[in-house]
Image (spheres, helix red, strand yellow):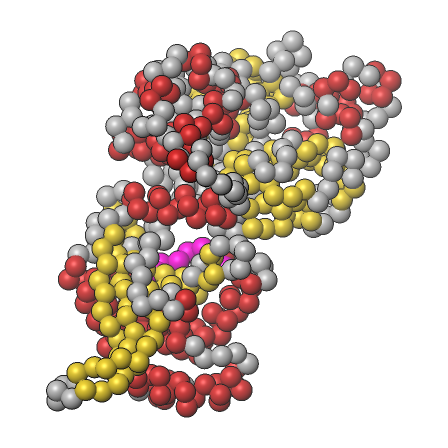
Amino acid sequence: MKNDIVMPQMGESITNGTITKWHKQVGDTIEIDEILLEISTDKVESEIPSPYSGKIVEILFEEGETIDVGIKIAAVDDDMNADVSAAAPAAAPAPAAATPTPAAAPAASSDTLEDVVMPQMGESITNGTITKWHKQVGDMIEIDEILLEISTDKVESEIPSPFEGRIEEILFEEGETIDVGIKIASVETDTSKPQGAASSVPAAASAPAAAPAAVATAPAAAASVPAGRRFYTPLVRNLAQKHGVDLNELAHLSGSGAGGRVNKADFMNYLNNRGAAPAATTSAPTATAAAPAPKAAPAPAASSVPSATSGRVEVIKMDNMRKAIAKNMIASKMTSPHVNSIDEVDMTNLFKFREGFKNQFKKEEGFSLTYTHFILYALVQALKEFPMVNSSIVGDEIHMKKDINLGCAVAVPGNGLVVPVIKGADNLNIRGMARKLDELVQKARAKKLTMDDMSGGTYTFTNNGSFGILAATPVILQPQLGIFCVGTMKKRPIVTEDDAIAIRQMMYATHTYDHRLIDGEIGSKFLRHVINTLQTTDWAQLF
């Protein structure tokens, strides 16, 4: 039986992944949990094990390609005698091979059977509930004709069919809730086949893992749909409304999602190049249907860079981590009006305590006691006092988080920046936070962080002092509302309360916050609370 392997979802907000390396090729055998490929997202790089044992009979994408979650990327046949050429259309006419090999028949009959999966209706949406089927098994359907209606906790939507043909399978009933990427139906595109012929394919039994197979042809089909009939997710519609892009202009975008659907990345890429390439908004619909369109869009922006045409230039291609960081930084600046409150901290008393205690701590715990551990403790106390800072904005709602999950930025040599999260930091003492942070840092340096290690953060800390700078104004990690940054500690002369001059260990601290919700008063009081905790706490009592 041939089993489909789809692009996995590595976290709630992850909508796609980039294949960085295939560990197996077509024709190779593989065991369950043996590494099949490596993928990278904007959060993490991961090795993906095979969920099946058998022979690799299909690999649908090359290294370097980015694929939406739930899309079929490979297939494994548990029949070791399966003909790997079954994945190629040219092998289908061979009658001699088809008769004695049971696995070949399902493969051939599934060539025109396209899977329909539960779509992702927004970055944080992980499932959907089927409220109504507009078609039944045996009915004919056109591309972009409404197939079903689904509801999520954000929106109710009509879902069009990405394929034309006959409804061969409906796997879930109205009222059932299904995870994003799970197969919910299938469409037989070869309507000359008798009804039910394709539904006997054994691969249908592995419905939860299935995804659209004809990925390459889907975008072109969707791009030819008239503007009035083309489907856009609520996320894309909201972005279009926000940026003044009407449906006629939206119709010219070529989508890279399933069935040629325009996703957020397509829209933002178009928006970034909108000013540089106005011709894209006036071109005929037939021109936008061409497959190369998405790759051609960035070209005008590249030609506008003066350094590319003068002087000596070395062109270095961004790796996936750097591209993801760049995209996220731009998105954060476009989303949140950043405000920075900056003040100085007298770290003298804390400095003296750490100097006298660090050797004992390392002997007891096995790792070094750093200033970061004290700052994380102070941040937890401030977040308890100002819970609004520990929130996020969803539409016109404020979501106040009851748990304090502290993200801590960690620089990984040659691999950019990662932000592992200390879950439930408000339930840990300072030693507990130090232990958890050390565990996460070690995993980050070994490239063994999981998506669970990096998801769910409610507030972030970053330490630029290790680079020797005095202060910085960081960028908020969406959808959080704030980030705390410190600079290096330096001895400086300070005027004391009794007008004397004293040499003190001083450090600058920056609280960067989202002005949509956090006003200057709260943002500044939060900063002062952290500073007071660092300056006045009797640290010996906490250890």
**Residue at the spot x=41%, y=66% of the render?**
467
Q: Is residue 536 above or below residue 481?
A: below
Q: Magenta residues, as a range? A: 453-459
Q: Is residue 109 magenta?
A: no
- Residue 10 in sight here: yes
**Residue at the spot x=54%, y=36% of the render?**
66
- In the image: residue 443, left or right of residue 107: left
- In the image: residue 58, left or right of residue 511: right
> At which x and y percent is residue 48?
63, 48
Report which quarter residue 26 is drawn in: top right
Q: Residue furthest front?
A: 311
> At which x and y percent is residue 187?
57, 20
**Residue at the spot x=50%, y=14% of the render?**
141
- Residue 145 in sight here: no
Image quarter (top left, top right, bottom left or bottom right) of the C terminus: bottom left
> At which x and y percent is residue 262?
42, 28
Q: Residue furthest top?
A: 192
**Residue nearest the viewer, comparing 261 with 475:** 475
Q: Is residue 104 above or below residue 416?
A: above
**Residue at the spot x=27%, y=63% of the render?**
511
